[in-house]
Image (tube, grey):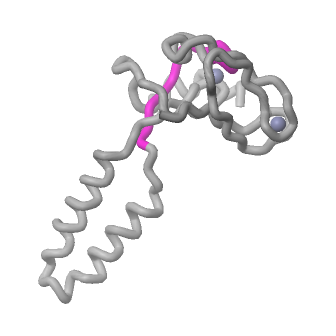
Amino acid sequence: MIFTISRQCPQCQRFQIVEVQLPQNISCPNCASRWGRVETLESVFEKCPVCECKQFWVQKDFNQALGCFIMLIGIVLVPLTYGLSLPVFALWDWLIYRRLPNYAVCYRCASEFRGFVIPARLKSFLHHIGLKYDRYR
Ligand SMILES: [Zn+2]
Ligand SMILES: [Zn+2]
């Protein structure tokens, strides 16, 4: 398993991905500005290693464009398959969706955490929590 932390670097404004080996100081691969430090895998979601925020949201690592594309093919095939393509493609879409890994995002600094075991207590994005952190972005 590869653990990565990715975010838009506040220093050089580029979106960068860092592979994490533990314990490790993490810094921007582009401009070398320091982002933070990861001690253990478990501690990551107790406190964001970048900004020390304690709140994260979870999202499927899903390429929206791909999902739309699959449904589009389903719709195009409707006349040929007498409408059967829609449920079939929707099911296919759903199966792909289910197999996708989750990743977590820090509410405050928007760092993305991939490959980590995400605690069950983390939920998908909640707007009222997001609002609280808007001023940090
Ligand atoms: Zn940078
Ligand atoms: Zn953070």
The residue positioned 38% from the left and 61% from the top of the image is 67
The C terminus appears in which quarter of the rendering? Answer: top right
Report which quarter residue 14 is drawn in.
top right
Report which quarter residue 27 is drawn in.
top right
- Taking the image as shown, residue 135 lies to the left or right of residue 53, namely right
Up-down relation of residue 61 to residue 73 (above or below): above
Was residue 137 drawn as part of the magenta stretch in this picture? no
Up-down relation of residue 15 to residue 108 (above or below): below
Up-down relation of residue 31 to residue 89 (above or below): above
Split into quadrants, the picture shows ligand 1 in the one at top right
Residue 78 at what x, y percent from top left? 21, 81
Which region shows up in magenta?
49-60
Residue 19 at what x, y percent from top left? 64, 34
The residue positioned 35% from the left and 73% from the top of the image is 72
Toward the viewer: 115 or 49?
115
The residue positioned 32% from the left and 50% from the top of the image is 97
The residue positioned 81% from the left and 23% from the top of the image is 34
